[in-house]
Image (cartoon, rainbow, N blue to C red):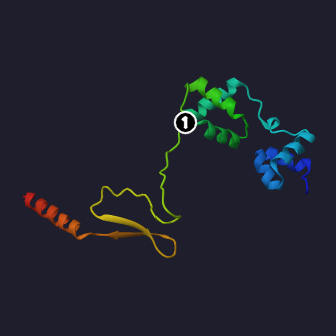
Amino acid sequence: MDYPTANIVKNYLNLGFRGREISEVVNIPYGTLRYFMSRHGLSLRCTYSQISADVLESIIYQVCSKNPMLGAKMFLNRTHAMGNRVPGARVREAMTVLFGPRPLHRKLKRRQYNVRAPLSVVHIDGNHNLIMYMAIHSSNSKQTRAFHITVLSELFKFKEHVEKQTNSVKP
């Protein structure tokens, strides 16, 4: 097994890679990477920025004032993009001090479908409640999404009925 040099691992750490990401890039197991890093005096903790709690709270307040729905994970990514690495526990603690307790798992709940086999139901969610005709979503043989609109005869009758009533109301 070819081990990376300490400089390569140090460069990946400076770029902001996480331990598992470095192990995938260098193609060695994660446990071996941790052992390698401990032998060479490298750690992920040394890459964190030395920011005081007051400065961190002011940064959080500035960023969250622009977007109040910002969570801890998105804030961590923003600070990482700005060049600061801060532990997630410190960010969550500072956010609870500033804004009070927030819901931890604020995610969209996705629909779960139980089908007999994969691809037995080809379905694209659409909101067609407000249109006057029935829309059927399907896909063609080239695996691209095609939008087929089928107009039913009852809907034509309904449309004619509505037109007759609107014409009779007009002066």
Percent position of residue 69, x then y: 52, 37
Image location of residue 159, percent across then percent down:
19, 64
- The crowd level at tag 1 (other Cα within 10 Å; few <14, some 14-19, many 20+) is few
Residue furthest toward the front?
116
From the viewer's perspective, tell me whether residue 111 is left or right of residue 61.
left
Note whether 85 is above or below 96 in the view shown: below
The residue sitting at 84% across, 38% down in the picture is: 43
Please say if 121 is above or below 58. Answer: below
Residue at left offset 45%, top offset 62%? 123
Asked whether 68 or 93 is in front, the reply is 93
Q: Quadrant of the C terminus?
A: bottom left
Q: Residue at x 54, y 36 (%)?
A: 66
**Residue at (37% x, 56% y) in the render:** 127
User: Which of the 4 image quadrants contains residue 128?
Assistant: bottom left
The answer to which quarter of the image holds residue 19 is top right
Q: Quadrant of residue 124?
A: bottom left
Q: Mark 1 belongs to which amino acid?
A: Lys
For label 1, the SS is: helix
